[in-house]
Image (tube, rainbow, N blue to C red):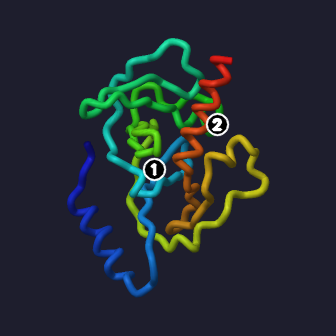
C-alpha cells in the first residue's frame, strides 16, 4: 500500500487551514491515459501498486478479474476501457480500491497524483456534450491548480459494469 505520512499531514493541515472556508471534500487525484480523474477520498479504501489479477471467464470488457485483498475477493476494473473503450496499461499502474455500496472494487489507474481538499460547491456538472454512457460515470469536473480534473461517480462505474454483466447473461 502506498502511504506517505508527510503528504497525509500536509492534506490534513490544508483542510484545517481552510476550516473557515466552509465544508471541504478531499479528492484522490490520479492519472489515466494522460488525463486527471478523481474519486472522493471517503470512497477510497486504499491505493496499491498493480499486482497480478486472476482473470474470470465470461466477464465483460472492462473487468480484468479479481484479487484477494485482506481476505476479500475484489473485482478489478480497467477504468480506461470503461471511459475510452481501450485497454489501460497492461503491466504497470496502481489499483485504487473504491468502497462502493455493494463492496470493494479496484480501479486500474496509470498513476496517483495527489490528495486535494476542495470546496464541493465548485464541482461543475458533467459537460452536456459528454456521451450518455460516459456521463453516467462522471459527477463533474473541477479545476485543481492548472488542470481540469474529472470527478468520477464510483456507484455509476459499478452500475455500468453490472449492466454489462447482465447483458452477457441475457
Residue 56 place in picture, x, y as percent: 46, 16
- In the image, 16 versus 154, the foreground residue is 154
Residue 66 appears at what percent x and percent y?
40, 25
Quarter of the picture holding the C terminus: top right
What residue do we see at 62% from left, 36% from top?
A: 160
**Residue under label 1:** 30
Q: Is residue 145 left or right of residue 8?
A: right
Secondary element at tag 1:
strand
| Separation (CA) of disc 2 from disc 1 | 16 Å
In the displayed orientation, state which residue is furthest to the right. 129
Q: Is 73 located above or below residue 17 in the figure?
A: above
Q: Name the quadrant containing residue 143.
A: bottom right
Picture quadrant of residue 124 = bottom right
For the N terminus, which image quadrant? Answer: top left
What number is the disc on residue 84? Answer: 2
> Could you say whether the residue bearing mark 2 is in a helix, strand or loop?
helix
Amino acid at each position: 500500500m502506498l502511504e506517505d505520512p508527510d503528504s497525509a499531514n500536509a492534506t490534513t493541515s490544508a483542510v484545517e487551514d481552510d476550516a473557515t472556508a466552509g465544508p471541504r471534500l478531499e479528492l484522490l487525484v490520479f492519472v489515466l491515459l494522460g488525463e486527471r480523474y478523481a474519486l472522493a477520498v471517503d470512497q477510497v479504501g486504499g491505493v496499491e501498486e498493480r499486482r497480478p489479477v486472476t482473470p474470470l471467464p465470461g466477464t465483460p470488457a472492462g473487468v480484468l478479474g479479481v484479487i484477494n485483498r485482506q481476505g476479500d475477493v475484489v473485482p478489478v476494473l480497467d477504468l480506461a476501457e470503461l471511459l475510452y473503450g481501450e485497454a489501460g496499461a497492461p503491466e504497470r499502474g496502481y489499483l485504487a480500491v473504491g468502497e462502493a455500496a455493494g463492496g470493494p472494487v479496484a480501479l486500474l489507474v496509470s498513476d496517483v497524483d495527489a490528495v486535494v481538499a476542495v470546496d464541493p460547491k465548485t464541482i461543475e456538472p458533467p459537460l452536456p456534450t459528454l456521451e450518455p454512457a460516459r456521463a453516467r460515470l462522471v459527477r463533474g469536473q473541477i479545476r485543481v491548480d492548472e488542470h481540469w480534473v474529472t470527478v468520477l461517480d464510483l456507484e455509476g462505474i459499478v452500475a455500468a459494469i453490472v449492466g454489462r454483466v447482465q447483458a452477457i447473461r441475457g
